[in-house]
Image (cartoon, grey):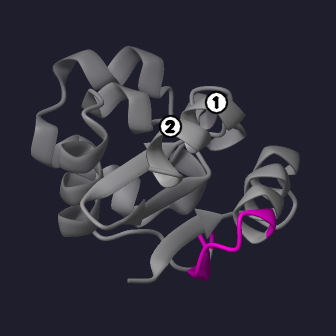
Amino acid sequence: MKLTYYGYPKCGTCRKAEKWLETEKLDFVKVNIAEAPPSEEQLREILLFSGLELKKLFNTSGMKYRELNLKEKLPTMTEDEKLQILSSDGMLIKRPIVVGNGKATVGFKEENFENVWNN
């Protein structure tokens, strides 16, 4: 089964992750997260498969996150509201995301990729 890779072409970490996937000869579809962010349903799946908390999906170092003052707003938002805002703008989502075969990773740490995608 093909993996889906959500990345941003100008992001150095995304490029490293993409290169890792190519080096390991993993079959993946590349999606520009800024142009086509995952839907709320896809984000729920990513959360389930990754085992992460919802707050870990936010790109807290991004300009958009700061512009929207999400640090202050997130604690009072519902899960549905958080997923809605994430799916509305890919630049709010921590990247890269790789999902497939009932697994998902968010961000890139080579050791984590080894454990998840080479097993």
Left or right of residue 16: residue 65? left
Please say if the residues under marks 1 and 2 sit with CB atoms less than 8 Å apart: yes
Left or right of residue 16: residue 119? left
Q: Residue at left 77%, top 70%?
A: 22
Per the image, the residue denoted by label 2 is: 115
Numbered badge on residue 55? none
Q: Position of residue 63 (x, y in %)?
A: 71, 38
Q: Residue at left 39%, top 69%?
A: 38
Q: Position of residue 104 (x, y in %)?
A: 38, 51
Q: Residue at left 11%, top 34%?
A: 78
Residue sitting nearer the eye, 24 or 88: 24
Up-down relation of residue 51 to residue 118 (above or below): above
- Quadrant of the snapshot with the N terminus: bottom left
Q: Position of residue 19 (x, y in %)?
A: 83, 62
Kindly indicate the quadrant of the structure image that contains residue 39. Answer: bottom left
Per the image, the residue denoted by label 1 is: 111
- In the picture as drawn, the residue positioned furthest to the front comes out as 119
Mark 2 crowdedness (10 Å alpha carbons): few <14, some 14-19, many ≥20: few
Left or right of residue 80: residue 15? right
Q: Which residues are magenta?
A: 23-34
